[in-house]
Amino acid sequence: MSAGAVEEQGRVALVTGAARGVGEGIARWLLARGWRVALCDLADSNGNAVAAGLGDNAMFVAMDVADESQVKGGIAAVIARFGRLDGLVCNAGVASPHNGPLEDLSLARWNQVLAINLGGPMLLAKHCAAHLRASGGAIVNMASTRASQSEPESEAYAASKGGLLALTHALAISLGPDIRANVVSPGWIDSRDPAQRASEPLSADDHAQHPVGRVGQVDDVAALVAWLLSAEAGFVTGQEFVTDGGMTRKMIYR
């Protein structure tokens, strides 16, 4: 076992949006490396069953990240169970980037997307800060390549993810040197369950359009998040890490 792995034994991470997909993958990756992990998701998600299947070092916390009382209560439950907090991964978010025609976008929908995608990470950082400061911990926010490029009819999602980039570097300055904060911006990550991937395989063109020759996998993101939480990334803060197989660097004219 490496020195870095030894240092991670017994550390505690809170991961939101962890009942499935990328969040679940991050939780599994951290658990495999000796972390204890609180998987946070909506009460009606499959999070309780997922956490139960991951062993004694995992717990499920029902949490709507846009509800400050639920955020505070969830963090208190994590501290009561594990006694400390070393890492915060803000992965929960609105799944679909599309909001329909701008003329039909309601202020209520706009506010809902920003409350979850941007307000949630702010509330979590606010209420986790004291615990992370005590452990010299780190924050990793999950944005998207849509923070810097767009499809039509994605105003709310793009604005929320762009705001998350700015929130992250603001947190890095406000909370440093005790707490580091970075943001990961994934591109196309195939986070579907194995059955769906088998029944609806991606095409050769889906993979070939990426400069690395394939669509991203959950573990591509999980490995980067784990490194950003580790002591090995101790000189890294306030930065965006684009994980998209090179797609945002590829010039395309059609």
Image (cartoon, rainbow, N blue to C red):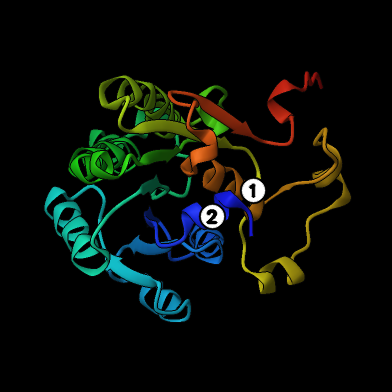
Q: Toward which corner of the image does residue 243 lie, by quadrant?
A: top right
Circle on res. 15: none
Q: Nearer the viewer, residue 141 or 93?
A: 141
Q: Position of residue 143 (x, y in %)?
A: 47, 35
How many numbered discs?
2
Q: Residue at x 36, y 76 (%)?
A: 48
Q: Position of residue 83 (x, y in %)?
A: 23, 62
Left or right of residue 50: residue 216 = right
Left or right of residue 178: residue 126 = left
The answer to which of marks 1 and 2 sits earlier in the sequence is: 2
Q: Position of residue 91 (x, y in %)?
A: 42, 48
Determine whether label 1 and label 2 are within 8 Å by CB.
Answer: yes
The answer to whether residue 97 of the structure is visible from this angle is no
Q: Residue at x 78, y 62 (%)?
A: 201
Left or right of residue 206: residue 178 = left
Where, quadrant-wise, is the N terminus in this rendering?
Answer: bottom right
For residue 98, above or below residue 204: above
Marks 1/2: CA distance? 8 Å
Q: Secondary structure at mark 2?
A: helix
Q: Nearer the viewer, residue 11 or 99?
A: 11
Q: Residues within 10 Å of mark 1 (few under 14, many from 20)?
A: some
Q: Secondary structure at mark 1?
A: strand
Q: Residue at x 50, y 65 (%)?
A: 31
Query: What residue sits right under mark 1 in the picture?
Result: 189
Query: What residue sits right under mark 2 in the picture?
Result: 22
For residue 70, above or below residue 121: below
Q: Toward which corner of the image does residue 90 lie, by quadrant?
A: top left
The answer to whether residue 171 of the structure is visible from this angle is yes
Where, quadrant-wise, is the C terminus in this rendering?
Answer: top right
Q: Position of residue 154 (x, y in %)?
A: 47, 32
Q: Give amino acid for label 2.
A: Val
Q: Give amino acid for label 1.
A: Ile
